[in-house]
Image (cartoon, helix red, strand yellow):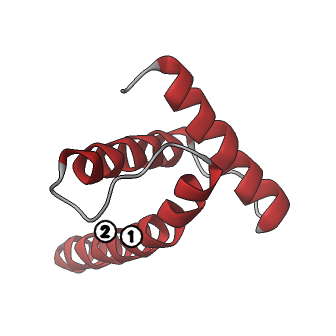
Amino acid sequence: MDTLKDREFIEETFTKVMAHSLMVSLPSKTVVDTFIAYALSRLQLTNSGVGKGGRKLDEQYVYDCIPVFMDWLHAHSKEDEVYVKRHMERA
């Protein structure tokens, strides 16, 4: 399931969406790697019966993962900002 081919497909599709559809620069390698891990984990959960339905890895699946991942990334970055601000005030 988690093969190099799958990882490359997800990265290629994610890159295409960012550059061509959203017209933004590609995020850092860490963000791309985290997205790949998220997409593969979500696919494994849905196909194992834990999540809803069974999905296949295709462009539509990757597209569907992006909004949820972006929300998580935004929330996570806010948590980091609060953490840094709290520690900067103490210094």
Which residue in the protein does label 1 denote?
Answer: 77
What residue type is disc 1 on?
Ser
**Front residue of 52 and 20:** 52
Q: Which residue is mark 2?
A: 80
Q: In percent of the image, x 46 and y 39: which residue is there?
A: 33
Give the Cα separation between the discs numbered 1 and 2: 5 Å
Percent position of residue 11, x then y: 60, 38
**Which labelled disc corresponds to residue 51?**
none
Up/down of 74 relative to 28, above or below: below
Q: Position of residue 78 (x, y in %)?
A: 36, 78
- Amino acid beneath label 2: Asp
User: 48 or 83, which lies in front?
Assistant: 48
Q: Secondary structure at mark 2?
A: helix
Measuring 28% from the left and 79% from the top, which residue is drawn there? Answer: 82
- Residue 50: where, in percent of width, then height? 15, 56
Image quadrant where one finds the N terminus = top left
Q: Is residue 57 above or below residue 78?
A: above
Please say if 86 is above or below 51.
below
Contact between labelled residues 2 and 1, with CB atoms less than 8 Å apart: yes
Please provide percent x and percent y for residue 80.
Answer: 31, 68
- Residue at screen point 53% across, 44% down: 32
Report which quarter residue 21 is drawn in. bottom right
Residue most toward the top? 4
Evaluate whether residue 11 shows in this view.
yes
- Residue 16 is left or right of residue 33, and the answer is right
- In this view, which residue lies farthest toward the front? 53
Q: Identify whether 11 is placed above or below 1.
A: below
